[in-house]
Each structure stands twice: as structure tokens, then as C-alpha cells.
Amino acid sequence: MEQGINDLIEISQYYGKQKDFVIAGGGNTSYKSEKHLWIKASGFSLATIGEAGFAKLDRSLLAEVNTKTYSENVLQREDEIKNDLLKSRVEPEKGQRPSVETSLHNLIDYAFVVHTHSTKANGLMCSNQAAEKTAELFGDQVLYIAYDDPGYILFKVVEKAVLKYRAEKGKEPAVIFLQNHGVFVGANTITEVKAIYDELIAKLDAVYGEEAENEKLPVAKVADKIVPAIRMMVSGEGLKTVRLVNSTLFSKYLDRANQQAIAAPFTPDGIVYANSTFLFAEFTGDADAFLNDIQQEIESYRQEKGKLPKVIFALGLGVLVMADHAEGAEILVDVVT
């Protein structure tokens, strides 16, 4: 195994194991030589990825995506691009599916590219002042891309911005912020990648100030009755996993005054894993009354959204998460905390 691949595995696991940067399947990483690009294949976790988790691609074939004309129909276009990405595989017999963001990685002219959904970076990228504050904090040392349709359209927008940056600055952007998405960091060594990320986070920390306390708290004894009952409510098509968690962070924000402020996810990962809206309930000491209210709320949610809720903020109890399995429930806990 060449050193570049060893380094790619190291940097991937380094950020993949930090939930402040990557939750579940979020983010991707790559390493490129003159002829080839190795990128995280779909279905692999950065936290545990090894050599087998990276798809090796032919860069000359990838470059054709930049200039090829694709269908105007969105679904057909994405299928065409996906097929071209698959054709670029050097080892198709492995059955790996390259990340949908492969073209972005190939575009950025650094050996290593690490894309994360950093919680702190997305605190900026998902704010209503993303553009202004990015310029204020980082000036022209980074490239900021306003939100656009994911996939090929976004790639072409970034490509245009990168070409302009190169022409004006005479260098490659090492940091690309994507509104409502995350951040790409590029460098020729993984030491440089870490240094750039450290600098970004330090600047954001200076603005954010002290982090909110988030210490785990015990759940009420009544959870022994409530959790199994809710599991039965949501297990119509296969047994679900339901967890009740509590913390000082939840205790601070779980009240009527803050309900609207936290009624929907703040980041794309929240939407992907926890649905676009949450449920709210209040426990006042009567478990039967609480369960009756919850059953009605769940049914209303199902009727309106066509699916089950995944997160219930329960004033007086904590947060209930519902998933198909224990791993999914753990991801939901990570998302809401």
C-alpha cells in the first residue's frame, strides 16, 4: 500500500471518529495522484474505513464529466453522471460506488481533500448570516458557495468559482465553505489538512464563546413504562428501537419558550436522519395521560407526513428517539445533541 493511501486512511479515521466533524455516513475524503483518485465509497464509515473502503478512479475519465453535456431532466442527468462515475472505476469488479461528490474532489488541486459536516462549521453555514460572517471571519482566504441544488448543478457552480479564484489569486482555494452543507479542506499533506481545520475551528470558537453544558442526566423511573409503550405504538411494521435520553442541555432548552426555536433541525444531517420536523410533548407526572397524548401526536404526524416521527422532545422527561435499530437510535442521539 502506498504512503498516500496510508495517510488517507489515517486522516479519514481521525475526523471520522470525532462526532463534531462526522455523524454516521456524513462526509468524505480523497487522495489523488496525477492519474488516479481514491475516494470513500458509498456505504463505508470514515471512522473505521480501510483500504477496501476507497474506490480507485481514473482521473482522465473523471475529467470528461466536466465537459460532457448531460440531460436537462434532473433524474436522467443524475443517472447519466452516476454511470460515468462508475465507468471511471479502475477496479469495477469490487462493486464500489464512488461518492456523489467525486467530481468536486477531483476538481480541487490538492493531494488530499477532507469534506466534513463539522458541527461548528455548519453553525456558520446554516445560519441566516452565513455569507456575511464568512467574509468577516475569513476574508478572501476561503471560498464561500451559496446554496444550490446538490449534485451536478452544485459541482458546476463550484467549478466556476474555483476557476475564478485561481485566476484572481493565482492559487488553489484550500477551504471551500458550502452553505447549508459543510466544508471542504484541501492540502498536499494530512498534517496541513489538520492545521487548516484547527485554524478554522479556533476562529469559530472565538466567535461562539463557551460551549453550552451538555452533561448526561439520569432518566426518570417512569421511563420503564413509557419507553416500551411507545415502542409498541411505532412498531407496526417491524420492531423499533426507542430510547429516552436526558442531559443538562435538554433541561435548559426543553421549555415552552424555546419550543419554536428548536422545532426543526438546524443542519442537513438533522434532516437526513431525524426528519424535517420534531414532535413536542409535556410530561406532568401522569404516565397514562402522557402516553395517550403521544399516541394522538404520533398518529397526527403519520397522517400529515406519511411516516413516523423520529424525535420527540418531552418536557419533563428528556428526548425520545425512535429508529429501526440500536445504531440508528444512537445516530439520532448524536444528531440532537
Image (spheres, grey):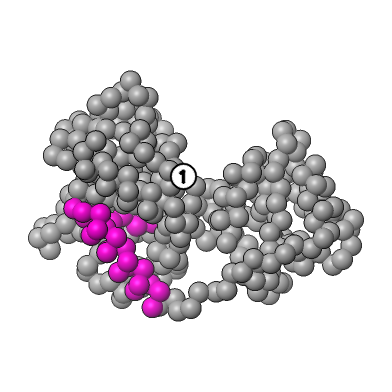
**Residue 251, how many percent across, how many down?**
68, 71
Q: Is residue 131 magenta?
A: no
Give the camera-side residue of 156 and 62. Answer: 62
- On the question of residue 277 being in view, the answer is yes
Residue placed under numbered mark 1 in the picture: 25
Could one spot residue 69 in this view of the protein?
Answer: no
Mark 1 neighbour density, 10 Å: few (under 14) some (14–19) many (20 or more): some
Q: Which residues are magenta?
A: 181-206
Is residue 172 found left or right of 136 in the rendered image? left
Task: Please identify the quarter of the rendering in which residue 153 is found.
Answer: top left
x, y percentage for residue 162? 20, 54
Q: Is residue 11 above or below residue 2?
A: below
**Could you tell whether 9 is left or right of 263 in the image?**
left
Does the magenta stretch mainly form a helix, a strand or a loop? Answer: helix
Q: Residue drawn 16% across and 33% down?
A: 60
Nearer-the-camera pick, 54 or 303: 54
Which residue is located at x 13 percent, y 59 percent? 171
What's the residue type where badge 1 is placed? Gly
Residue 290 locus on image (x, y percent)? 84, 58
Please, what secondary structure does the residue beneath circle 1 have?
loop
Q: Residue at x 33, y 36 (%)?
A: 51
Which residue corresponds to the image point at 65% horizontal and 71% vertical from the top-left?
248
Which quadrant of the rendered structure holds the N terminus? top left
